[in-house]
Image (spheres, rainbow, N blue to C red):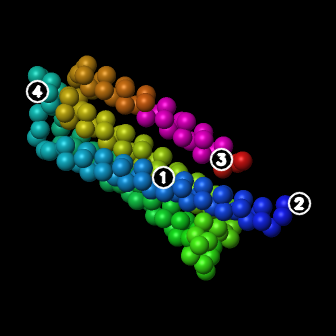
Amino acid sequence: MSSPATSSTSSIATTSVHVSALDGLVNVNSLFTIAVFVGLSLATPGQHSLEQRSACDASADVAKKLLVFEVVSFSFFLFSSLIAQGLKLALNLLNSKDVDEIFRAHINIKVLRWGMMASAVGSVMGCLFLMLSMVNVIQIRLGLLSCGSESAAQAVATLVTLVSSALLIYISTAIYAFWH
């Protein structure tokens, strides 16, 4: 059986890790939110692609899809960040009455885990919709995939491969951490 001092030290370390993880999630979501607004600024109606053929210019439907995907992506990142901030608030307010005990919390671990998982799911969904919006930015700037734009196809293939790989690793890690 562990002594109260060991248990207290373990609680401080565990809570500190949770707060750090939540901080990281909020920071990453903030960066992705900036990317959302950059994507929105790159899509102007009637813009010609860099492809020399007018058949490769994106229609208004592509710009509409871009806008919808950007808004949905932003919504998921905001959802994720608000849950993470709420959990951080709970960890910091519920744990102590003393300023020196900011990293020790008495919170239901199941609530913390499910909240962190919900926040992670929000981030993953935000990334998926951000990726879809970036596909539309690529089509607006480099030419439609349907017209055979080689530059657009290469950019989309790279984007989908790297983002999907990173999300797979992120999801695997989150699930492992959730169950262990």
Q: Say which residue label 2 marks.
A: 1
Magenta stretch bounds? 163-177
Callout in the foreground (3, 2) = 2
Q: Say which residue label 3 marks.
A: 177
Residue placed at 18% from the left, 38% from the top?
59
Callout in the foreground (3, 1) = 1
Q: Say which residue label 4 marks.
A: 54
Disc 3 element: helix
- Where residue 89 sits in the image (x, y, percent)? 52, 70
Residue placed at 72% from the left, 47% from the top?
180
**Mark 3 or 2 closer to N-term?**
2
Kind of residue at disc 1: Gly
Mark 4 packing: few (<14 Cα in 10 Å), some, or many (20+)? few
Kind of residue at disc 2: Met
Marks 3/2: CA–CA distance: 25 Å
Which residue ends up furthest to the bottom in the rendered image? 97
- Where residue 42 sits in the image (x, y, percent)? 19, 43
Residue placed at 25% from the left, 38% from the top?
137
**Mark 3 or 1 closer to N-term?**
1
- Where residue 123 sits in the image (x, y, percent)? 47, 50
Residue 72 visible somewhere in the drawing: no
Contact between marks 3 and 2 (CB within 8 A): the answer is: no
Disc 1 element: helix
Which residue ends up furthest to the right in the rendered image? 1
Marks 3/1: CA–CA distance: 15 Å
Residue placed at 60% from the left, 45% from the top?
174
Marks 2/1: CA–CA distance: 33 Å
Residue 169 among magenta residues: yes
Disc 4 element: helix
Kind of residue at disc 4: Ser
Residue 53 visible somewhere in the drawing: yes
Contact between marks 4 and 3 (CB within 8 A): the answer is: no
